[in-house]
Amino acid sequence: MLDILLSQVVSGLVLGGLYVLIAIGLSIIFGLLGIVNFAHGSFFTLGAYFALTLFQTFGWPAVIFAPIAVGAVGMVVERVLIRRLYDKEPLLSLITTFALALMIEASVRLIWGGVGQPFSPPKFLAGFQIWGPVLITNYRVAVLATTAAVLIGLWAFLTYTPFGRILRAGSRDPEMVGLLGINLPKVLTWVFGLGCAISGIAGVLAAPLWTVTPAMATNAIMPAFVVVAIGGLGSFPGAVIAGLLVGVVIALTIQFFPEASGAVMYLFMALMLLLRPRGLLGERWERFE
Amino acid sequence: MTVRKPVSAGTGVIVGRRVTLLGAASLAATSTLAMPHIARAAEPIKIGLLLAKTGQIAAQTEYLANGTYLALEERGNKIMGQPAELVWLDEPSPQAATQNMQKLVQENKVCAILGGALSSNALAEEATAAQLKIPFIVDNAAATEITGKNCNRYTFRLNTPVLVQSRMLAPYALNYGKKWYHITASYAFGQDILRSSRELLKQAGGTEVGADEVPLNTPDFSSFILKIRAAKPDVVVGGLSAGDLSTFLKQWNELGMKGKIPFVEIAIGDTDIWAVGPEAATGTFTKMWYYNNPANPPAEKAFAAAYLKKHGRPAADKAWMGWITARSMFESIEAAKSTDPMAIIEALEAWKFQDGPASYAYRKFDHQMLVRNLAVSVKDKITDQWDYFDVKAVLPEKAEDLEKAFGTQEEIGCKMT
């Protein structure tokens, strides 16, 4: 029994890793822009479709440009649409980003068609590893490693670079950052692009595992919100811990009570909100009080 | 003082205003009464289409809708010599689907409705069809109850019920062995498959070594696959739908299970397997129609050619399902010479498609269309991006066994009121 449980935990970590990537982008955008982005899952979908097209046209190495393309789309969306929502009623941003999600799904359907697109892991990552009781495919090892690398890189970026410091300061006191002579609107465009690009990375990694369809965002957006709520809105480490926890809890529920595997993360969230309404590592943010 | 002058009616004769108004009113009244066919001709015959426009099932509904529109275009967009049009509304959930059904009837004034892509939606929709007294053909949903215990006079159904398809597939599963593992969706369609398959396995004296009910839109099946791997079944009997089936088969291959444990399932859609890709596709399935089946009758070959010409890709089975359902409805309205609901229902009950060996009709006591299904297996080597299957058999093998395969009225439990 222990061997299957260990395998399930590893399997859950891979799923959780993808959830972390999707949720981190969502959390960053909320933390710095104050926008609850319902369209975030659509950037995940775009990541998968851009990866598919780049792979079909140029081969596997070109796939790394997919998140950059998603980030670029995100920046355009911020300039055209999201910018107009700052300091407006939260309801307005919810409705607008929900409409944006529908529009992106319809555009994907129009460009790539409604039928799912075949997309398998690369040949050089075929096969699997058996480490004692644990079975894991090479592709999933690569997903875990990439997730870890992205998270470490992002943490280092936010902590040690001047731009990262501006982002963190801007998230707490945008007015003060503006008074210091920093062009905050330009910074916010980059932040939105960064959040979308991270979601795009998750889309690229998920494409060979999940079915690539225009509606694939449905499988991504709700877990992302759950992870952010459990981890604490705007908290980077909170999203990482919560994402991995959610993945593992789902995997273990599949082992013992599979019918509940879809609902267990919501139960987990409800419990967390009852016990700690700000989430695991959620802090008090003056600007959102 | 202004003097009002009489108005000229354009004939040089001077007439009074009251006479002019009276004449105009009389002309308007008599033209409507004397030439009703002209008035009707201006108003097209409307048929409702109730199919999902978003979500995982949209990959299938796109083809269902394409087939439906093609059936209307084949008729020059006319029924009974009058212009005809389809009004397509969404079915995002059972509740929203029934609201849209009411809208189709009360606002759009449709005379009949086609649709019902998911069993959970179709079960709610058929009850609403009876309430609204509108002829309704379910084109895709396969839950047994639709034409079983939930049947009603206004609802007809194309897809072969789960129980019947499960009976057709069972011999293929038993060929692999009697230790089965069930992995089914946790909604009406999957639960129906699980119930039917368990019963058939029990009758065959087999053992269920595991069963998982999977929530809709599950993105990661690796944990389920690890359980199946540990249970070591002879065969996995699936009951997943649309995108979930595609995701499962992709991950089944990724985890090295393809070719190790056989996989079987009823009612595969071409769009499901196209999304899997040639490397990962595997399994034996039942399905209603296949575009590359050499035994297709001439009318269906012509439909497949017309679809390819119009859309630039082969007709998936769902396109055929949309096409044949729509044909049955359009031809029945034509035969009824009326848009009266009961006249259409009686015409549907008498409708028959006969082309060579292909013969389809709705059974009168449950309104289920009797169609022989295909048993198909994924080809060993897939060289065409659309052509995944080898047709192994037509089921039931003898046409005269068709009625029996669909069950008797007592077995079905349909009692129409």
Image: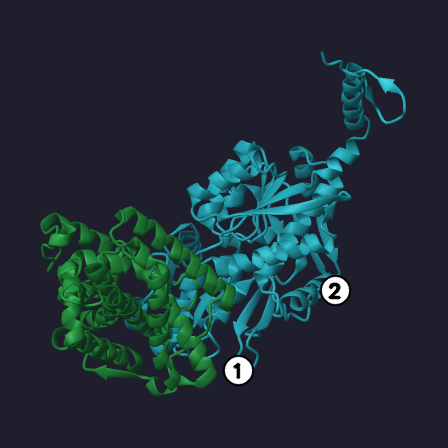
Whether labels 2 and 1 belong to a single chain: the reply is yes
Mark 2 residue element: helix
In primary-sequence order, the first of circles 2 and 1 is 2
Few, some or many residues within 10 Å of mark 2 (<14, 14–19, 20+): few
What residue is rendered at 43% in x and 52% in y? B192
Vertical relation: B85 (above or below) B248: above
Identify the chain drawn in green: A
What residue is rendered at 50% in x and 71% in y? B274
Q: CA distance from mark 2 to mark 1?
A: 28 Å
Q: Is residue A9 left or right of residue B260?
A: left
> What color was chain B assigned in the picture?
cyan
Pick the residue in front: B270 or B147.
Answer: B270
Mark 1 residue element: loop
Res. A259 image quadrant? bottom left
What residue is rendered at 34% in x and 81% in y? A64
Q: Quadrant of the N terminus of chain B?
A: top right
Q: Position of residue B43 (x, y in %)?
A: 70, 38
What residue is rendered at 79% in x and 16% in y? B5
Q: Which mark is residue B298?
A: 2
Q: Is residue A124 left or right of residue A278?
A: right
Q: Amino acid at mark 2?
A: Pro
Vertical relation: B256 (above or below) B223: below
Res. B310 image quadrant? bottom right
Chain name for mark 1: B
Q: Is residue B388 left or right of residue A187?
A: right
Q: Position of residue A28 (x, y in %)?
A: 21, 64
- Which residue, given by chain and number where applicable, does mark 1 sit on? B381
